[in-house]
């Protein structure tokens, strides 16, 4: 069954003409690993057991080509990461060179990134922009082409981040030996394998998996809970349909789970749920084989048939087509080759990714860039305080409040305070999902706080951007509301009084009524009707008191009334009472007392009428002229 093949191995142009073994392990969504063993004296001096020359192989590219014909059917370029000497039984030993596919170049360590309104192609390009293009060739052609409103790379290497995108958006991600593919290639290589000819062993099986589920995602802008469940069975071959039916019978109860990615519409969540269903279904049929055909490649299609002895001879039976998702190659120094491969149904559009790790985000610091929410929902845009290659502003994020919701009068019940531009805020993540950041609140730092006046927490307060304050003083038990030190209202508990202080003027106004107090001591009361009621007395004192009439409104009369239930006292150094036409005084008794003199003067005449009796008395004399 084994067939010798042609093989060519070189390290940065240095040919390795003789070797003991070469092993290559290739899988979807993983780095490929390889190991090459060759005689020590092929590179090093015969009498020295050192790595004097071979140590220079570290970091270099290994190129391997092998196949049956003149044109090599298989090619692999890898990056050497380790060189060692392996000795045993007293022999000089072998040089062992091992490493990974060039995808290791984007697996440098945990990194951070923020991407706003970019599609998958752009995100992958930016995440791998600083990778050496000479060593890592990429093909980026995702099936999902819509812009993603916001996505975060959180403490993941670029490879881990892209691997997670592959899992969440159900995109193919694998290294084909020459280039790193993100997205299913337009054309796949195909090889024909016959059991009994170039297949030594073959295992074909089916399994069941839970397929009844519902995904949900809360959309805060519309206050809507989006949900979806798979719409079809994604069935293809009769065996696959049978596996789906068996899965639904065994796992008949549906389960519910939040969607990992951000969605903004019912159409989007339907797409993700159906793609995930296809990925799960792709694992229900699987195949494993071992053979010696070098045309078996990762990401290629193998058409498998069986050649079995029948009554009249060998009969070939078609077994189906499968997508190779893993392959392990073994070659020795004399041209022997074998491979072991795994595959799923060739009809699989989406693949399940087991190796992707979900980030577990901690709370993060960020700076507010914008708080003018176009939808007027009190949200803000922030930028994380990260040092990274791509740090786009976030999408509009909700702000947590101690109390928020609807009230009896409509919207805005609770504590509506939107962080200011430039504020430093704490960002957390709903459900621990890095795709759903939310603002927890603001924090002070060394350049924007002075707590010297807040000793022992006796003073608590709120201050707006322009300096308006609400101060609670627990030491003196008073509350102050003001715009600055000159303009404030103070409510004090101990003395039980309220103080209103203004630097220039205090105005109390409602409708057509106004009370004005200014800093010069002027008080003005204006209104259509003014009533002053004293149940015991009303005391008005001034060096000068003036009472007069404004022009009357149409249909009104010129009239002033001063009334009290008991007494009205009017006191002044001088009081002038003047009526343009007539002054009348009515009472049972009218008295005018003067310490020195009382004068009654008329321009023309005075009429004194006592009705029945008129008494005019003087203690010394009465003069009538």
Image (cartoon, rainbow, N blue to C red):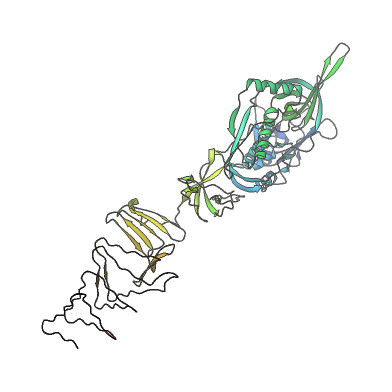
Q: Left or right: where does residue 165 sit relative to residue 347?
A: left
Image quadrant in which the N terminus is located = top right
| Whole-percent x, y for residue 561 in the image | 32, 68
Going 65% across and 29% down the picture, which residue do you hit? 87
Residue at the outermost front position: 612
In the foreground, 534 or 114: 534
Quarter of the view holding residue 66? top right
Q: Residue at x 34, y 79 (%)?
A: 581
- The residue sitting at 36% across, 65% down in the picture is 530
Q: In which quarter of the image is residue 69?
A: top right
Which residue is outermost to the left? Answer: 620
Q: Residue at x 73, y 46 (%)?
A: 134
Left or right of 201 on screen, residue 251: left
Q: Is residue 552 left or right of residue 283?
A: left
Q: Which residue lies furthest to the bottom in this view?
A: 625
Q: Nearer the viewer, residue 26 or 46?
A: 26
In the figure, 590 relative to 275: above or below? Answer: below
Where 478 sits versus 568, above or below? Answer: above
- Give the percent coordinates (x, y) of residue 293: 80, 27
Relative to 317, residue 389 above or below:
below
- The quarter of the picture where residue 97 lies is top right
């Amino acid at each position: 069954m084994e067939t010798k093949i042609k093989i060519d191995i070189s390290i940065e142009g240095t040919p390795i003409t003789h070797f003991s073994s070469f092993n290559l392990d290739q899988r979807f969504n993983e780095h490929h690993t390889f190991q090459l063993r060759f005689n020590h004296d092929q590179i090093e001096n015969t009498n020295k057991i050192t790595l004097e020359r071979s140590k220079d192989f570290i970091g270099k590219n290994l190129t391997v080509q092998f196949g049956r014909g003149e044109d090599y059917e298989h090619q692999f370029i890898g990056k050497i990461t380790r060189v060692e000497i392996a000795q045993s039984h007293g022999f000089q030993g072998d040089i062992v060179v091992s490493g990974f596919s060039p995808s290791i170049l984007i697996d440098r360590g945990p990194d951070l990134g923020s991407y706003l309104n970019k599609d998958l192609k752009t995100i992958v390009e930016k995440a791998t922009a600083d990778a050496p293009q000479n060593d890592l060739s990429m093909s980026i052609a995702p099936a999902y082409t819509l812009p993603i409103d916001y996505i975060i790379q959180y403490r993941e290497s670029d490879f881990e981040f892209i691997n997670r995108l592959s899992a969440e958006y159900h995109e193919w991600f694998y290294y084909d030996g020459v280039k790193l593919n993100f997205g299913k290639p337009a054309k796949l290589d195909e090889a024909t394998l016959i059991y009994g000819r170039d297949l030594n062993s073959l295992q074909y099986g089916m399994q069941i998996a839970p397929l009844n589920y519902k995904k949900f995602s809360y959309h805060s802008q519309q206050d809507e809970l989006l949900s979806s469940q798979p719409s079809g069975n994604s069935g293809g071959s009769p065996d696959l349909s049978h596996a789906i039916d068996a899965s639904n019978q065994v796992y008949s109860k549906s389960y519910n789970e939040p969607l990992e990615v951000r969605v903004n519409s019912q159409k989007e969540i339907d797409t993700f749920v159906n793609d995930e269903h296809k990925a799960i279904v792709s694992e229900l049929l699987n195949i494993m084989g071992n053979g010696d055909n070098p045309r078996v490649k990762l990401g290629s299609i193998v058409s498998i048939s069986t050649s079995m002895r029948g009554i009249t001879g060998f009969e070939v039976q078609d077994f189906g087509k499968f997508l190779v998702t893993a392959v392990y190659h073994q070659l020795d120094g004399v041209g022997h080759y074998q491979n072991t491969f795994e595959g799923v149904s060739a009809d699989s559009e989406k693949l399940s990714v087991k190796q992707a790790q979900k980030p577990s985000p901690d709370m993060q610091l960020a700076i507010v860039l914008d708080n003018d929410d176009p939808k007027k929902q009190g949200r803000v845009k922030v930028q994380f305080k990260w040092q990274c290659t791509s740090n786009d502003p976030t999408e509009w994020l909700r702000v947590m409040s101690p109390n928020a919701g609807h009230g009896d009068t409509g919207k805005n019940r609770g504590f509506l305070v939107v962080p200011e531009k430039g504020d430093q805020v704490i960002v957390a993540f709903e459900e621990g999902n890095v795709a759903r950041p939310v603002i927890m609140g603001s924090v002070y730092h060394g350049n924007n706080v002075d707590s010297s006046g807040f000793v022992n927490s006796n003073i608590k307060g709120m201050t707006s951007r322009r300096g308006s304050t609400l101060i609670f003083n627990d030491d003196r038990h008073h509350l102050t509301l003001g715009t600055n030190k000159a303009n404030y209202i103070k409510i004090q508990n101990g003395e039980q009084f309220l103080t209103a202080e203004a630097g220039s003027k205090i105005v109390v106004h409602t409708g057509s009524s106004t009370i004005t107090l200014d800093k010069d001591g002027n008080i003005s009361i204006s209104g259509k009707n003014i009533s002053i009621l004293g149940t015991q007395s009303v005391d008005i004192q001034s060096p000068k008191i003036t009472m007069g009439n404004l022009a009357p409104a149409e249909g009104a009369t010129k009239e002033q009334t001063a009334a009290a239930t008991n007494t009205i006292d009017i006191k002044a150094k001088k009081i002038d009472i003047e009526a343009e036409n007539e002054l009348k005084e009515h009472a049972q008794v009218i008295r005018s007392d003067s310490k020195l003199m009382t004068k009654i003067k008329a321009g023309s005449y005075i009429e004194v009428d006592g009705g029945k009796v008129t008494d005019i008395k003087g203690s010394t004399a009465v003069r009538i002229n």
